[in-house]
Structures are given as structure tokens and as C-alpha cells.
Image: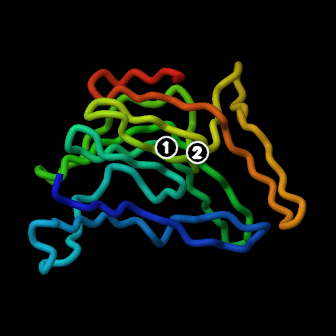
Amino acid sequence: DDAVVAIGGGEWETTRGGTFTAANVTTVEVLHLSDTNAGWAPAADPPFGPRSGCVSASAGGDVWVFGGYDCVVAPDGERTLFHYDDVYRYDVAENSWTTESRLPVQYYGGDAVAVDDRHVALIGGVVRHPVGDEMVMYHCVTSEERVGIVGEYSDLVWLYDTATGATELA
């Protein structure tokens, strides 16, 4: 209601084609708009480790954080990607975190927006979902020849109910 919350971030690494890695950007900070002279203050440590590509939105006075990924780069330059389906709620007034119901898919790189004080829409991004014993990426591939960019982004919209933890396709 009266605060801005900054969560994490990422740094671009160029080893083996590059990806965002969050190993050095793990803080959460709060700026209370009622006292901007106090500046940014550290928030309680989140219950999750470094990650990039997570999305967040404010609903019901709390900040909700969804999914993301982390890229761990070994000394030999080998990258390992970890993708997440978890959901966390940050209570600004209490300066505390809780773990909430997981998403039915691994999700990162999209956007989140509160639909009302109860629901958050997860839009676009990359969606990985289980099929048997494998994780399959669902995406719509787009290509832009003039700049050589290929993106793998979902055209799905998920609706997360912050009261029940239920997630459904919108």
C-alpha cells in the first residue's frame, strides 16, 4: 500500500552463450513511501536462494513472487540451469515471508499483474511442465531476422488465486 519492494535481479554472464545469473544479486529491499528520507532498507531474508526471471505482483497488500531460474557456472565454465515452480508471499507490514502453494508448471521470464486484491495473472514467459518423467517447454517461438533474436515465450496466461493457492489457465 505505501511501499516499493525491490527483489533480486541478475547479471549477464557470457560463458557458453550467456544467461542471467543471480548469484551476486540476492537482496530484497523496501522503500516506505511514508518516509522516503529513510531510503531503501533491507527486508527480511527471503526463503529462496538466488534467482533470475522470477516475477512479482502486489495483491491484497502483500508482494507475491513466482518461479524464476538460477544459472550456476562451474569454474570450468559449465552452466547448470535450475527452474522453479515455487510461490512466496512477502508481508511488508510484518517484514516476513511465507511459502505458498506451488505453480503446476515451472515459470520464468514473463510478467505478473494483480487482477484484483486476490488474483495475480502470470503472462507470457517460459513455461516448463511435466510430461511423464520429463520437463517439456511450452512456448511460441518467434524470430526476428534483422537482429537475430529467437525467443521462447508462452502465449498462455495463468491466474493464481492468492486466497486458495489454486492456479488455472485464463
Q: Residue furthest right?
A: 145
Dot 1 falls on a residue whose secondary structure is strand
Do the numbered discs 2 and 1 sit on residues whose CB atoms are within 8 Å? yes
* In this picture, residue 51 sits left or right of residue 134: left
Residue 73 is situated, as x and y percent measured from the top left of the image, at 65, 66
**First in sequence: mark 2 or mark 1?**
1
- The circle drawn on residue 67 is 1
Residue at 26% x, 34% y is 117
Element at badge 2? strand
What amino acid type should be assigned to the residue bearing mark 2? His
Residue 94, given in percent of the width and then of the height, sits at 11, 50
Q: Amino acid at mark 1?
A: Gly
Q: Nearer the viewer, mark 2 or mark 1?
A: 1
Q: Which mark is residue 83?
A: 2
Q: Residue at x 73, y 46 (%)?
A: 152
Measured from the top left, where is residue 106 in percent x and y?
Answer: 57, 36
Q: Is residue 152 above or below residue 168?
A: below
Task: Indicate left or right for 60 with 160 as reference.
Answer: left
User: Dot 2 surroundings within 10 Å: few (below 14), some, or many (20 or more)?
Assistant: many
- What's the residue at 74%, 64% (across, down)? 78
Query: How many residues crowd mark 1 within 10 Å: few (<14), some (14–19), many (20+)?
Result: many
Left or right, residue 15 beside residue 146: left
